[in-house]
Amino acid sequence: MPAPLSASPASFLKHAAEVASFYGFRPLREMERSIPGTASRAHSFATASGVCVRCLAARPEEPVLIYWANGSPMHVPHNLTEAPIAGNRGTIGEFGLHIVGVEESLAEVVLLKTVATILSEWGAAVARVRINALGDKDSRTRFEREVSLYVRKNAAHLDSECREILPHNSMAPYRCSSEQCRSVTLAGPRAMNFLSEKSRLHFREVLEHLEKLSLPYEFDDMLMLDEREPRMLFAFDLAGEDATVVGGLGGRFDDYLRRLSPRPAIVDGKTSAGVSASVYFRKKGLLAQRFKLAAPSGVPSVYFIQLGLRAKLEGLAVVDLLRAAGVPILQSFNSSKLTPQLAAAREAGVSHLLIMGAREALDRTILVRSMDNSSQQIVGLAELPRFLKTFR
């Protein structure tokens, strides 16, 4: 049920944590307890990223999905939304999500889906998702070189303050809100036109998956200039004003994570790949203690295992189906290996497994297996919620 507009920030954080847990995310504080020396009094994008990288250093075969909250966001952008954020950052709180250890576009899909579900179930309808691809380091270098040539050629049309700092910062006009600079930058180079082949293919995959999520999206060339050097940025804009939620922002931050990697041996590949998103909300009256998020109470009796990309994509629809039916589940985020998911299911002490591979995804079925005696049967997705309720 959508939350009323009068719902409190504390209610929103509880709701966001519950949804995130359903999609396989765990609280950052729980992750910190498993890695000595990582505990932090206050969480942020930086502290969350550091914990994720250290977890992957210890267990590189298993991606990390965590959520956290912060009463003092560091990265609220001026172009997040039309809502009046600038000058009022002291009134804004942040609910953050990280997926680290996944190079594939599936990470963006799961993150986008989770944020969209948090917003829509709260009652904050998503008007659109704005998205921009900035690409890898080579892509950004080519783009910034072209921007430098362009703005110098058009320096006479820029705001006077931007002209003064142009020799030291060629991207300054893109940060400027004056009409002069805006008219120049809107006609200038676009980052998406300078993507490397690898970055272009990754972005195309994200867009294809985004189409399947039925989320309205549009390209926003001005969504950029984040000091964390994202390879991709996306922003959630709301259809109307919400009393609590302001909007959301996220992206892929592989290069930022690579700088945090504790050993040179782990900077390559999945251990330095990750996406993150934040939902910004009005925190008026929210006590500091409320930002210390824990896992939702109650232990689901079912663990959802997905094997392969097709099963992961179809699995998002399964999660939606079970959420609508009020059937809680646990799941991890490994698209290729069965063993880590089985180990996580045993550790959680669930009574049954839901297993979906490529064949089940194609047939729209799922394998239900008992943890006690390994008996199993195939169940159609349409009948799955009713079938699982018989376990209660």
Image: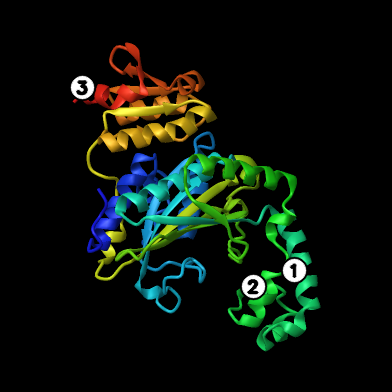
Please name the amino acid that badge 2 sits on.
Tyr
Q: Is residue 390 above or below residue 98?
A: above
Q: Are marks 1 and 3 in contact (CB under 8 Å)?
A: no
Q: Which type of secondary structure does the marked residue at label 1 adopt? A: helix
In this rendering, does residue 172 appear at all? no
Q: Position of residue 356 (x, y in %)?
A: 44, 23
Q: Which type of secondary structure does the marked residue at label 3 adopt? A: loop
Q: Position of residue 113 (x, y in %)?
A: 44, 45
Residue 259: image tag:
none
The residue indicated by pointer 1 is 147
Query: Relative to the observer, which residue lies in front, 21 or 175?
Result: 175
Residue 174: image tag:
2
Mark 3 packing: few (<14 Cα in 10 Å), some, or many (20+)? Answer: few
Question: What whole-number distance in Å separates the C-alpha atoms at marks 3 and 2?
Answer: 58 Å
In this rendering, does residue 157 appear at all? yes
Q: Earlier in the sequence, mark 1 or mark 2?
A: 1
Please name the amino acid that badge 3 sits on.
Thr
Q: Earlier in the sequence, mark 3 or mark 2?
A: 2
Q: Earlier in the sequence, mark 1 or mark 3?
A: 1
Query: Relative to the observer, which residue lies in front, 295 or 327?
Result: 327
Question: What whole-number distance in Å separates the C-alpha atoms at marks 1 and 2?
Answer: 10 Å
What residue occupies the far bottom of the structure in this picture? Answer: 160
The residue indicated by pointer 3 is 390
Mark 1 packing: few (<14 Cα in 10 Å), some, or many (20+)? Answer: many
